[in-house]
Amino acid sequence: MTVVTNPARTNSDDEIESGHESAAGEYAASALDIEEHARLYDDEKQSDIVFVAGINGDTWRYPGHRRVLAATSPVFAALLACKTDVIVVDYIDRRGFEQLLRYHYCEPTQLNSVGTARCALDAAYKFLCAPLAERCARRLDEMLDAGVALEILRDLRFLCARLPGAASAPPLPALSDDAAARSLAQCSRWCDSLAHNALLVLDDDADTALTDERLEELTYEDLSLIVKRDTLRVSSELVLAEALSRWATAACKRTKRELTSANKRAALGELAYCPRYLLLSGDELDRALGLELLEPMERALVTARARKLSAPVPVGAEQESLLRRWARPRPVEPAALPVHLSPRSEPPVDEPQPSKLCARRPKRPKQPSFAPEEKRKKKGCCACFGEGLLRAFICLFD
């Protein structure tokens, strides 16, 4: 079993400590300033800037204060450098932007739902607020299940640095501020840790994830992250084949294509080879091949190999490799240990088991003694005999 350490904890203690202080560390205020910032939240009278935040037409208006927000991150400092009185933030959900403002104004964040926590994580990443990103990652990990993991992976891939298939992040040396580069790296580590745990949850509860309707909303890249995993523990490979067929049907509808087998195979591409067809038999194999995710000749090869018949055509090296992969059982052990972000992902503590000898004859606890130290010392047989003989002589001559 591979043990994976927390990607967000790989730096030295000094660097981690500086990362936790990035939002309020280098720009940390005294207790009086924190109390003053809390009073300024949603204060329209003293505000000198207005933010209009939201996406897809769902925009809200938020009053702000330059002297408070300009010191929180280089992103806010760059936004507030302009002289305009209204700043439009149309690349962040208004729920996430509100939680970002609450954090910077020292107000309690309200991460009560998965949607709000996801939006707040996106806002924290784009505004380089590593402590808020950590808070969101821990809260999402606490609520993590198969359905939540699908929602998280739908957008999280663009925020990760080491997730397979993730979008390329801007190079850190391009950032002029070292503190900004550290904050971006720490935000990416928290996202990597959350994505790592989400994929492990999908491995463990694969049947629930593959039958969830939210799977059909995933992009091709997000779906590929899930179905290509060797450690996906499904009860039957038919569940995976049916999930791929549903996703291919939804993809054809989105792109307004005819629901033909050829169009479905074109939408899936190499993902059609992910189910291990030769682990199925009988009616399940017929149902999986009936979905027509494979080409007709490939279906004929699977049928011939499953029934131990001669192949209808000569089998090349590529086809033989596919047939062997489709017959290989999936590993039972999980891919790795989860990153400890919340009590849900806390690793189990293995208690040492006593041996059989100890179990039959448990060690008797030592009884406490309150006698003086000199009286607690045991005497040997010779010492007791000599002491008795001496007492006898004393009595005789007395």
Image: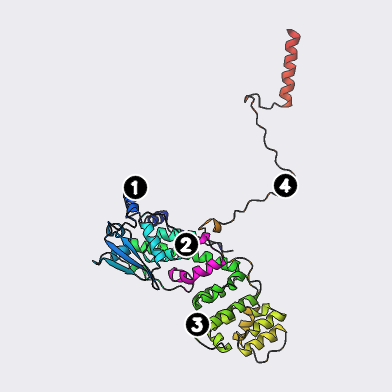
Give the amino acid at mark 4: Ala
Question: Is residue 219 or residue 192 the one in the foreground?
Answer: 219
Circle number at residue 359: 4
Residue mark closest to the camera, 2 vs 1: 1
Give the amino acid at mark 1: Ala
**Disc 3 crowd, CA 10 A, few/some/many (<14, 14-19, 20+):** few
**CA distance separating discs 2 and 3:** 37 Å
Secondary structure, mark 4, is helix
Residue mark closest to the camera, 2 vs 4: 2
**Disc 1 crowd, CA 10 A, few/some/many (<14, 14-19, 20+):** few
**Disc 4 crowd, CA 10 A, few/some/many (<14, 14-19, 20+):** few
Task: Determine which residue is flagged by label 3.
Answer: 254
Q: Are marks 2 and 3 in contact (CB under 8 Å)?
A: no
Secondary structure, mark 1, is helix
Question: Is residue 289 or residue 45 the one in the foreground?
Answer: 45
Residue 10 visible within the image: no
Q: Residue 293 in the image: state x and y as whole percent.
A: 60, 84
**CA distance separating discs 2 and 1:** 32 Å
**CA distance separating discs 1 and 4:** 57 Å
Q: Are marks 2 and 1 in contact (CB under 8 Å)?
A: no
Give the amino acid at mark 3: Arg
Task: Determine which residue is flagged by label 1.
Answer: 31
- Give the residues in magenta: 140-167
- Tell me the residue at 56%/89% (across/down): 262
